Image (tube, grey):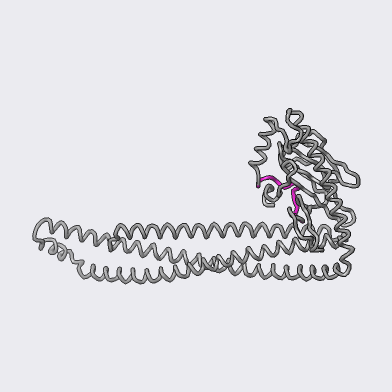
Amino acid sequence: MIAIKPTYKFVFLMLLLLSGAFGYAQNNKQKQLESRRQELRREIQKINALRAENKSKEKSQLSLIEDFNYKINVLSNLIKVTNQQANLLTREITSNQKKISNLRDELKQLKADYAAMIVKSYKSKNQQSKIMFLLSSNDFKQAYKRMQYMKQYSDHQKQQGEIIKNKTAELQETNIKLLKQQEDKNKLIAENRVVQKSLESERKQHQVMMASIKKNLSLYTSQIKQKQREAAKIDREIDKIIKAAIVKSNKKAGKKATSKSFALTSEERVLASNFISNKGKLPWPVERGVVRLGYGNQRHPIDRSLTIKSNGVRIATSKGAKARAVFNGEVSEILKLKNVNPIIMIRHGNYLTIYKNLASVYVKKGDKVTTKQEIGEVFTNPSNGETILSFTISKGFTTENPGSWIYKM
């Protein structure tokens, strides 16, 4: 065998390690994409299930547009993720095809070398020839070296046989992997065609509805603005209550009433710390649902000149769904405003979670609640069958994106 110099050994080892790391990264990326694809598929199933539940109800144009927008967004993301998976598989298939070609070339050369060694061994297999080879040595040292050479040659033959065996197994394994990758890719492409058809259908229905709405856009715009004013009024009432609660906590602690954050006891500091440590892992405020409206400022789906100022999320769920506390805390307030469904505020140290649009309330102010405890039933609109929970997370007056806190929201 050819001896590898130390420098080349290092380069060879580094290339081997880099190849392994690249393979691991590719595999890890594929797992992440598959996990995300399955999440999106589950999301579509939930959307379809909720649609089926409310099929007999006459929904408002606004609600239908929100439904279409959300499903179109999820379907588009599913297509995007599936394409990423297919492209990654294409790269892996190309890499394995190249690897198979190289392995075949290596095996061809290894088998040729091995065959030459076998022929040579056969020609010199006569035991007497080996003895004569040793006895013809000039001295003992040369005889010893010749004996070592024969042993090394024999070991080299065995080693070459093992290399051929291992390379053959590697080639077979790579071939199996390649066939599986090609099968997976074809499956993804077929699934994507089905999703693409569904997306096209949703877009056509969306376009038809938008064309109908645009004929009487001014009426819809005035209705939207009225709803926005009502929502802003509720938010102002919530801000007043939060401000009063902050003032009260600071007075109790002997601090300035002008402070914009809660004065925390040692127990409340621990609670706030635990709440923060669970960021991204908190359970959903309903057992089953989909986010109909996300957090933050966004263009209105009907009138693009209007901006939706969303300080939380709106979650569509099933009729009779229960609102759940997302973490341990204390019920700081139950709001019952005129012409507004009940609202529950739960305090977690210096954080608040707010649950709007409830039909009934199971807790009272001052109650200690635990994670996933049912705190009320979500209101179902009798005219359109929609069951929507509005959910907000805030630190003092500052709202935060629930999507960053709730698991896989």
Looking at this view, is 131 or 105 the one in front?
Answer: 105
Question: At which x and y percent is residue 244?
Answer: 80, 36
326, 155: nearer the viewer: 326
Using the image, determine if residue 253 lies above or below residue 97. Answer: above
* Residue 186 vs residue 196, the one in the foreground: 196
> Does 407 sit left or right of 360 as displayed?
left
- Compared with 250, 223 (above or below) is below
The stretch drawn in magenta includes residue 326: no
Q: Nearer the viewer, residue 250 or 152?
A: 250
The residue stretch that appears in magenta: 280-292
Seen at 75% across and 50% down, the residue is: 312
Magenta stretch holds residue 285: yes
Q: Residue 195 is drawn in which quadrant?
A: bottom right
The x and y percentages for residue 240 are 82, 41
Q: Quadrant of the N terminus?
A: bottom left
Q: Position of residue 321 (x, y in %)?
A: 80, 48
Q: Position of residue 49 (x, y in %)?
A: 77, 58
Residue 239 vertical position relative to residue 179 in the rendered view, above or below:
above
Q: Is residue 324 above or below residue 136?
A: above
Examine the residues drawn in magenta and state their main secondary structure: loop
- Report the number of discs: 0
Within the image, what quadrant is residue 107 found in? bottom left
In screen coordinates, is 156 left or right of 172? left
- Seen in the image, is 231 located left or right of residue 256? right
Report whether 30 appears left or right of 95: right
